[in-house]
Image (tube, rainbow, N blue to C red):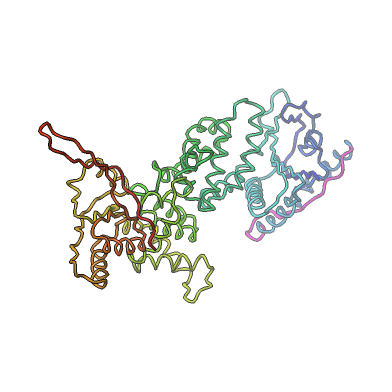
Amino acid sequence: MHRLITFLGTGTYHPTRYALADRDPAPATPWIAQALNWLLEPRPDETVVIATAKAWDTNGSRLCEAFRASGLGQPRLVTILEGRTERELWGQFEQLKRELRVSQEDLVTVDITHALRHQPFFAAGIISFVRMVDAKHGQMRVVYGAFELKREDVAPILELTPFVELIDWAHGLVMFLETGRFAHVSELFMKEKRYIGKTTRNTNALNWLYNSLNEFARDLQTIRTGALLLGSANNGRRQPSSARRLLEAVEHARKDIEVHMPALADVLDRIEEMARPLVFDGDALVGERARDVLAALAQLYVNMGRYVEALTTVREAFISLQGPAEIAAPGLPHYDHELREKVDNSMKHKLGNVFRSIVQFRNDLDHAGYQKQINPAKTLIEQAHKWAKEISKYTCSPSVFANISNHPSNEWSEDQRAAAREFAEAIIDVPFPEVPPGADGTWIEQKAEEVLASLPAETTHALVQGEFTLTMALVKRLQQRGIRCLAATSERRVSRTEDGRELREFRFVQFRDYPPLV
């Protein structure tokens, strides 16, 4: 059904020929409603006239006579008060709202040519309300017969519908920026892109932006941290992160958006502000830059009121930032889930109550309060805000490679030091204790605990080489805390001097993992 809603005032209307788009002008008539019944496609099934009692007394009979004379169905009158009081205005609101609400398959054309004083603004407000609160509203069109712009007795009918659609764009864009949901914008974007495709051949930049927005939103909503920040591996090829792709797409499509989608152009900078802090160069979420990016992601979730996602991101950030790289590369081939679980288990030793507190709040949200100890909503929101800001407070120390041996790192070859720094940012020397020949198992266990207690909380890797039984005791304890245990392998080279002496040289080859003892 196509319903035409028009306004009628008390003025004296003069015959003119109205023209709509590229169609031939309608015959001369003082009534824009009559001209629209001739010009609109599809033709209106019903014409609704919004008028005060005074306006209908002044012009109603003449309008109805014109409709009869041209074979059109008689218009239906909706009488409104003049709106002199707030109560009368709310009465008008209810009447207009009722007329604007139609089924999803129907079309409403609103003509504001003869609307008086506040009525055009009032109608626009009600149109906005209906389109915002009705999940499935009908199609809507708004037109204005510009009598004052007529030339050679022809007045153009201005199409104001694109400005009504700004309401939909505003709603959708606000939803995306404030919640990360793209569905409201997706349909508008595709509709506009199809229209643009009819007038220009190249829509590559718009396609790129659409796909990037959609992918970023999906990754954000499902907490795909690896895809958001690191990218993914597809058929052996590394794909950029969705945050990076979105940032690049915005820049690439900016000019086309400004020309074809001015409503979207206004928020490109805000979309860029959302994506830029999440762009990360690296193969794993370790180091200071990764800490800042993860904090930005947690803060974005907090700003969107997505507290489950925020505290989940915080918890996983605490683990990732302990290193090594293999535990902080979700979605990439070198990710090691078993090693990450070991580091996860070790966090209660490294951060104690701090980490347990984060886990508790995250679990409370994740399990919908079905726990023995539950927190009020206010507390959970406060904690999400707090931990999004305090990631750096507990994770800013560099990762540590502990050299538990009697070979000081300053005597290592440059190759060996470089290999150690690929695992962690700092190398510390922890002298391997001398084990008395008469020491028993209790002494070994006690000494292993002492060495373990001396290691900094940031230790992620350890070279363990010394007396065999203490080495075994140390490796077992270190692995229980998620610390990766290594042995240095070397190649022996033998040469002889001119006087017949034999020279032995040991060249570092690699660090090799101890087999799991836990």
In the rendered view, would you say 436 is above or below 60? below
Which residue is at a point 61% across and 39% down the rendered structure image? 189
Question: How far across and down, in percent of the image, does residue 334 sit?
Answer: 44, 46
Whether 128 is drawn above or below 319: the answer is above
The image quadrant that residue 505 belongs to is: top left
Q: Position of residue 282 (x, y in %)?
A: 39, 42
Q: Is residue 34 left or right of residue 369?
A: right
Q: Where residue 391 sits: x, y (%)? A: 36, 57
Closest to the observer, 494 or 470: 494
Task: Say left or right for 460 vs 378.
Answer: left
Residue positioned 79% across, 48% down in the render: 57
Please report the bounds of the magenta region as a residue range.
71-88
- Residue 157 figure quarter: top right
Residue at the far front: name it: 500
Q: Does the magenta stretch include residue 82?
A: yes
Residue found at the far left of this picture: 499
